[in-house]
Image (cartoon, rainbow, N blue to C red):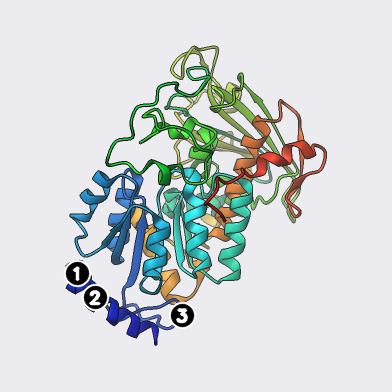
Amino acid sequence: MSRQTHRRQFLRETALAGAGFWVAGGLTQAESKSPNEKLNIACIGVGGKGSSDTDQAGNHGNIVALCDIDEGTLHGKAKKFPRAKTYTDFRKMLEELDRHIDAVVVSTPDHTHAPASVMAMRMKKHVYCQKPLTHTVKEARLMGELATQNKLATQMGNQGSASEGLRRAVELIQGGVIGPVFEVHVWTNRPIWPQAPEITARPRSTPPVPKHIHWDVWLGPAPERPYNPAYLPFSWRGWWDFGTGALGDMACHTANMPFRALKLGYPSSVVAETGPLNQETYPAWAKITFEFPARGDMPPVKLVWYEGRKGGKNRSDGQRVLPPAELIKGEKFSDSGCLLVGQNGTLFSPNDYGESYKFLNRTGGKAEKDIPRSLPRNSKGDDGMKAEWVRAIKEGKPSIAYSNFAFAALLTETILLGNVAMRAGGAKLEWDGVNMKFTNAPEANQYLHTEYRKGWTL
């Protein structure tokens, strides 16, 4: 039976059940590239950021399925997409609707990005996944490999990638506007959620799981623990088992532009200085230094990441961890941003996404007007990221999506090495990126991935 015949049968069955949806054209991964045909898209995680991701995906395709562990959130979103089938477990959704789904949007907490995305990719579904791409380094490596092997169109949701400012900054840096770059400094105002020293142990109370929450599915591959509202809907970011802390939350945004502009790849080493560590949450502050080797005619680069506050009792107390003030010469540090320090000046970007920038201390380098535009433009921001992804699917050209997994997996993998370094007690870790291991500290390799709970797998 052909795939299109399966779809017609599915339409009849779901229409009779009162849950039918309209499918235009029966587009499949490789059978049709007509811009007039719509993709069938399933959305996993439809609350929080997932709400806008779902709405935007609906601008560019048929939303045929919705999945969320919170039935209240799920049914609320279903009011906007009444023809979509609803699920509380993405595994069941993908198994049941395999032949009727072209692409999947994943907007769940960090620890379930990879289980959902990898399952979909192994089923040859194109994937849009929120940042950070994964919870662990190993997951990031696998997702990049699967996208390439299966020739899938993919996109990570770091929406600053779509901006004119970021793409122009990449062109200018690569064009030599501040000359060779030797240092990068990136900072954030995160964490803005509870974590150490506010939290040093997991909650002792074990309230009943609300009837609308599917707690076991929310836990996913994480170790078993009782439900507590300390974890969801938002504060999971600060817990080792669920989130990726301030670094994972923001560096896929704030380090994105310099990582692209400087053509960074695997770092040669990473070392972290942090506040006190505990077994449950990320530290209150950290300064992480990545060293990158020369790339072609680009010199070696040191990239330093800064997060949190020192000396406080909670996330709003104490002194912010920031780059040396002399680097910005009288400018004020923004909540988040980055500095690229070159031979002929400094590029200062004072926002999360690298969308805006100014030049400090210019002493030469090429004129901006002499550096041509070389990148395609996408002026529609977050919605434009979805449009770019859908176009990549229809045209069979994964590279159209600017934050496709070939790039995004490497960015995420590099960033998450910083979280590994946090747990290494200040040791400088030497990284063999090709073989995905630390050469001087094999004991740190255990933090490149976490053991999945029984019933969950990659």
Q: Position of residue 405 (x, y in %)?
A: 54, 59
The mark that comes first in sequence, 1 or 3, is 1
- Marks 2 and 1 in Cβ contact (< 8 Å): yes
Q: Secondary structure at mark 1?
A: loop
Residue type marked 2 = Glu
Left or right placement of residue 222 versus residue 385 in this view? right
Q: Amino acid at mark 1?
A: Ala
Label placed on residue 13: 2
Q: Secondary structure at mark 2?
A: helix
The answer to whether residue 343 is visible is no
Residue underneath mark 1: 17
Does residue 377 sit above or below 341 in this rendering? Answer: below
Q: Give x and y (percent) for residue 175.
A: 60, 54
In the picture, residue 12 is in which quadrant? bottom left
Q: Which residue is mark 3?
A: 30
Of circles 2 and 3, the one toward us is 2
Instruction: Tell me what residue is drawn at x 55 percent, y 57 percent.
Output: 371
| Cα gap from disc 2 to disc 3, whole angstroms | 26 Å
